[in-house]
Image (tube, rainbow, N blue to C red):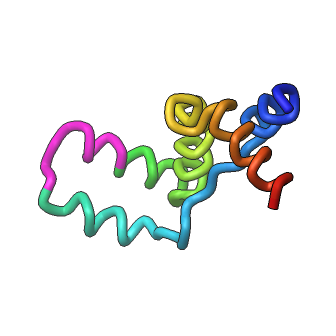
Amino acid sequence: MNKLARYLIEHIYLDFDGGITIDQVREFLRDEDSRESRALLAKLIEDKGVDDMMITVAEVLKDYLRTGINEEVLREQLRMYSES
């Protein structure tokens, strides 16, 4: 059970529901005239869209899953599944 839970945590796939366009990002950032928002918009324009950003953010967020979704939780869910 421990090895299976560890494997599942290491291979979890994180995605965002729905899509977002660069125009939507512009709209979200419109009222925010900060250096960070301008830099993000410039990077998205350079990248010709938001796809690379979405992939990168999802990959980085995977590292934070362990603090909320951990092996103990998965083991418990696997145990409950096996008992159902």
Q: Residue furthest front?
A: 83
Front residue (pair 12, 20): 12
- Classify residue 47 as left or right of residue 40: right
Residue 40, position as x, y percentages in the image: 36, 45
In which quadrant of the rendered view does residue 6 lie? top right
Taking the image as shown, residue 74 lies to the left or right of residue 36, namely right
Name the spot of residue 5 as percent of width and height, x first.
79, 34
Residue lying at 58% horizontally and 45% vertically, measured from the top left: 58
Q: Quadrant of the N terminus?
A: top right
Of 71 and 17, nearer the camera is 71
Q: Is residue 37 magenta?
A: yes
Any magenta on residue 69? Answer: no
Q: How many marks?
A: 0
- Which quarter of the figure has residue 29? bottom left
Magenta highlight: main SS = helix
Place of residue 3 in the rendered image (x, y in percent of width and height, measured from the top left) = 87, 27
Q: Position of residue 78 (x, y in %)?
A: 78, 46
The residue stretch that appears in magenta = 32-40
Quadrant showing the C terminus: bottom right
The structure residue drawn at horizontal position 69% and vertical position 31%, both measured from the top left corner, is 71
